Image: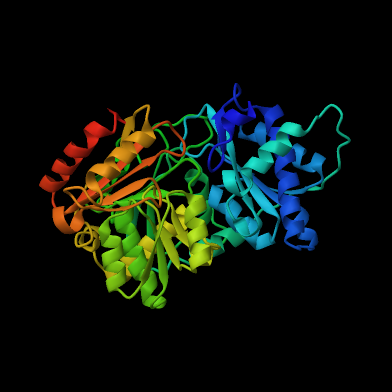
Amino acid sequence: MLGRIFKAYDIRGTYPDLLNENLAWQIGFGTSKYLLQDAAEAGETSPMMRNIVVGRDMRTHSPSLSKALIQGIRDQGGDVIDVGMVDTSFIYFAVNHLDCAGGVQVTASHNPPNYNGFKISKRKAKPVGETSGLAEIRKHAAMVDKQTLQPASGRLESRDLWKAYAEHVRSFLKVPAGKKLKVVIDASNGMAGTMIPKVFGKESPIGAASGIEIIPIHFENNKGAFVHEPNPLVAANMKWTQEAVVKHKADVGFCYDGDADRCFAVDEKGHIVGCDHLTVLMGKYFLKDHPGASIAYDLRSTKAVEEDLTKAGGRVVRGKVGHVNMKAALADQGCVFGGELSGHFYFRENYNADSGAIAMSVILSILGQSGKHLSELIKPIARYAQSGEINFTIEDKDGAMAAIKKEYGPGSSFAGKVDELDGVTVDCWAKHGWWANIRKSNTEPLLRLNAEAKDKATLDAAVGMLTPRLGHRVDH
């Protein structure tokens, strides 16, 4: 059973058939053993390094799974600081703010309500993925026998860190005094419905953010149901934000995912803004205060990222897809900021971690300081035609990628450049005006295609050439 719920970046499955309280206890035990060993091997001797922060999202089974997970941690000997119902980025903050051995968020992010799972971080909120700890946690969890175990008695305490968290997030909000911004926020019936009022609104322990008028959508998150799938990566889920921005004549709109660690933006005309275009916008903002700094981006992003940020004096770091890889890129390369096509944005001053709330704060700061509409700021960045992510099912994924490499790479009539940083990227830009990346999904049995061209006609031709070789196209 454990093998079916451990994924590349987290633990996730349907409740209660694949993930239940018994498994949550085992995972808590395995997580505690791994995190405490990791701290000990790093020479960390502080008493706080026996603490593991635990939070949960709004799903109806999250409280019982959290309780079982906490008991497993304590039975192994770890101490627990329970921070309650919070967004995932809150956990990253708490682990660093309290200097703990790690943290666990009980969440299934953007999945339907019958799913749940665990996102695990270690010291400094470094992500725990399959190759950076999850395999060890799975092994520890599988080996423990609850019936014969002599449980330890780890300590449990609850803490309210909302004031410290609000202060941290709001430190990124730098809208000039007197500037007014009307903002639509679709919480997707997820954790943004709790986080936004406590960080920016009337429930904030440091007071509501001045100059920001929030128009809330789908903030109710206590019924275990979603009006729409809490995944802003799917365009159909953005229509509520788009319609509300136009209806209320708002300056900008944001749609959050289920655990509120990422959000997508909508401009004042109701148009969805590409997250790679936002990477350029925010990257240039950070380069003003950090000239020559490095900025990370995932390799699916528009060529405008490299072109514009290099022109602005930055050094770009092209990275693999996934938060484990992006956080590593920020840490290893000393990047001030990083952006991913999926809506995850990473900040050096946020412990290299991602945050939907901080991304929103930065975008609002840019709008407030520039005095321009978001559409004006994005127009010169969004100058190329993009396919978006197109998914395919095919038996021989490796064979398909090898065929693409052979047909369009060096030695072919296309004479494209090829790299295999993540999947296969074929760059025929110089001669033919297009490039494409084909990679295996880390979470589903799919091939994913992202392509870009200098104009739509070239893009359509490129996609038309590539897709017959990739299998059966699926809408996803």
Q: Residue at x 64, y 30 (%)?
A: 2
x, y (%) of residue 383?
18, 57
Left or right: where 50 falls relative to 177: right
Q: Residue at x 37, y 42 (%)?
A: 439
x, y (%) of residue 211?
38, 63
Left or right: where 452 falls relative to 80: left
Q: Quadrant of residue 49?
A: bottom right
Callout count: 0
- Location of the C terminus (image quadrant): top left
x, y (%) of residue 48?
76, 59
Q: Quadrant of residue 232?
A: top left
Residue at the farthest right position? 150
Left or right: where 171 falls relative to 247: right
Whether residue 349 is visible here, answered yes or no, is: yes
x, y (%) of residue 107?
56, 39
Q: Nearer the viewer, residue 58 or 475?
A: 475
